[in-house]
Image (cartoon, helix red, strand yellow):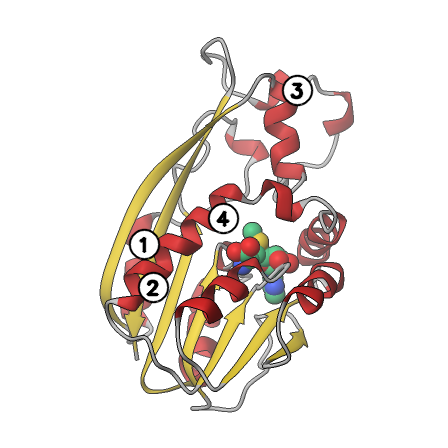
Amino acid sequence: MNKLKMKIRRHFDKADKTYDDYCLVQNDACICLLEMLKSYAGQFEVIADFACGTGESTLKLIETICYQRCYAVDFSANLLRIARKKLPDSVSFILSDFDISVFKRSSLDLVFCNMGLQWSADFQKTLALFRSYLRPQGYLVFSMPVYGNFPEMKNEFKYPLPAYDQVIQFLKNSHFKVLQSCVYQQAELFESYSEALNSLQKIGSNISLVDKGLKKMKEQDFFVDKMGVLPILTYRIAIYICQK
Ligand SMILES: C[S@@+](CC[C@H](N)C(=O)[O-])C[C@H]1O[C@@H](n2cnc3c(N)ncnc32)[C@H](O)[C@@H]1O
């Protein structure tokens, strides 16, 4: 595992006690994703929730669709520990990096991933891996923040994200049919800059590519100059319903 990935995992591991209280945007994305999925299919044999985290997305997934076997996959041992307590025995847990092969070819009917694929080391490779797990006509259903996320923050302090259209191109290159997709914005208002930055730390997503000098910086130095009276973080989230 490379240094950047270890750093990402460390941040998520540290968010184990706070994630569930701060994951409102992630929960909303999951509800939206499942609403869209329901209009295509509601019955599956074998399903997997990749980057399941504390199991919030897995719980919503299994409450919404019919399934026979469900796997929940994440590389954060601490978050998976919380998920184990929350989910029924019908769910099996796999502690693994989603960029590494964990399932046999043609073994899944649904690959689900809520707000996790942005952490992929190589988007195109991860898509190819996910496609290999799917049976013919199997579904890949995911949400993720895309380029334009947090315009209020300076670029050097954000994790780089592909654009909404770029993801569609990646999906087409990987021979997925894109059945439906959309992009939306959701703004969160905060009392202070530190509260805004804290909201990211509490869900483990405060990952910037810059490391040096962060501790010496003032909270507002992370943000672009022209902010209103109260700090805002505007999420730009995309949803994709795809079929093999
Ligand atoms: C924002 S959380 C989403 C969790 C959950 N799906 C939800 O909706 O609440 C992102 C998750 O991605 C996981 N993650 C990031 N990179 C990963 C990787 N390479 N392999 C497996 N899990 C990963 C993190 O550990 C974290 O649990």
Marking on residue 170: 2
Q: Which of marks 4 and 1 is nearer the N terminus?
A: 4
Mark 4 CB lies closer than 8 A to ligand 1: yes
Q: Distance between the residues labelled 1 and 2?
A: 6 Å
Q: Look at discs 3 and 4 and give the one toward the viewer.
A: 4
Q: Which badge, 3 or 4, is on the more N-terminal residue?
A: 4
Please state the horizontal and vertical placement of residue 70, each as a whole percent of the image: 53, 80
Disc 4 secondary structure class: helix
Contact (Cβ within 8 Å) of mark 3 with mark 4: no
Of the residues under marks 2 and 4, which one precedes in the sequence? 4
Mark 2–mark 3 Cα distance, whole angstroms, equals 35 Å
Identify the disc placed on residue 166: 1
Three-letter code, disc 2: Phe
List the single residue furthest toward the top: 229
Of discs 1 and 3, which sits in the foreground? 3
Camera-side residue of 10 and 26: 26
Amino acid marked by disc 3: Glu
Q: In which quarter of the image is the C terminus?
A: bottom left
Give, as a three-letter code, the residue at label 4.
Gln
State the CA–CA distance, disc 1 to disc 3: 32 Å
